[in-house]
Amino acid sequence: MRGVIAPYAERLAEAGVAVPWLEARLLVGLALGGAVYSHEDVVLDAVAEARLEALLVRRLKGEPLSRMRGWREFWSMRFGINDACLDPRPDSEVLVAAAIAYCHASSKAQLNIWDYGTGSGCLLLAVLAHCQNAHGLGAAGLGLDCQKGAIAMAQKNALAHRLAAKWLVSHWCDALDENAQADVILANPPYIATPELAGLAREVRDFEPLLALDGGVDGLGAWRQLMPRFVRRLGADGAAFVEIGAGQESAVIGLAACHDLCVKATYRDINGIIRVLEFTKQNGENGN
């Protein structure tokens, strides 16, 4: 006798879902209240079966499971997401790891860490979780985003993880006092070229906020805005950690050089692609 999961896994497989059995189990769990079920002898009543069928239809249309349940695990932490937030990706953990290492090596007792385009707050909160009260280090976090919905979600995530940070609706750092500076800047801006958006997987193209994806005609629009802000806002011995698209390193480094920023290090993702750049001021001193 076939269990309840098999037919749903088969329908997902026919639709090209990469891990149909896992997703079928997760959908069953979601239909039953959020638990993950890994066995076939789950009993569904009529209400749960109807809920599961509705969830399956949404998934077959491309909606990611993380969007259905409203959260994603990132850096072993659960982050709520909404329509104003980019769904956190494993590639971004490269940025978190690099920033944490920098913070732990810093000689400063207190670091001001800013996150440009914070979204769910996952980058800033993951870094703060490993820097506040760690190694005698203190960290003051500030998340910036032009979307009110993103800031609201980041605040909820901070509360859920009991992490102190400030949040501000702002176009990049423009709402801050003109003399304010950061020791560490984090940024994962939109970097996909507009002509490439149509070719993205539908899970991304149809369900991620366009504002967090579209980097303009060449994918470098956000970088042209950010580089002059980085050099103005970054402390003399500070560092900016930024996530870039595959193959963008030369272009982004070139833009940074035009604003007296130099690349100190590059970091590769699990596929060997340069995913994160670390910038410092050319006339600054290394604070590590």
Image (cartoon, helix red, strand yellow):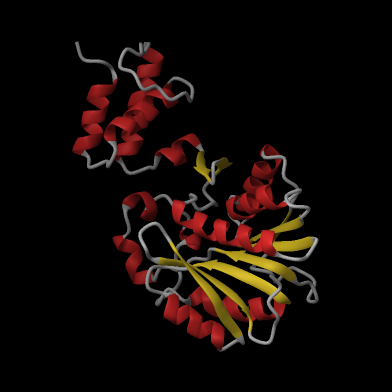
**Residue 236 versus residue 147 in the image, above or below:** below
**Residue 120 versus residue 243 in the image, above or below:** above
Q: Whole-percent x and y of residue 2?
A: 21, 15
- Residue 229 vs residue 83, the one in the foreground: 229
Determine the image quadrant of residue 230. bottom right
Determine the image quadrant of residue 175. bottom right
- Residue 130 vs residue 254, the one in the foreground: 130
Q: Whole-percent x and y of residue 143?
A: 68, 58
Q: Whole-percent x and y of residue 77?
A: 57, 41
| Horizontal side of residue 18 vs 29, given as left or right | left
Q: Whole-percent x and y of residue 54?
A: 36, 28
Q: Is residue 207 visible?
A: yes
Quadrant location of the C terminus? bottom right
Going 64% across and 53% down the picture, which residue do you hit?
127
Going 38% across and 11% down the picture, which residue do you hit?
45
Quadrant location of the N terminus? top left
- Residue 228 vs residue 57, the one in the foreground: 228
| Horizontal side of residue 235 vs 265, given as left or right | right
Q: Is residue 146 visible?
A: no
Q: How many marks?
A: 0
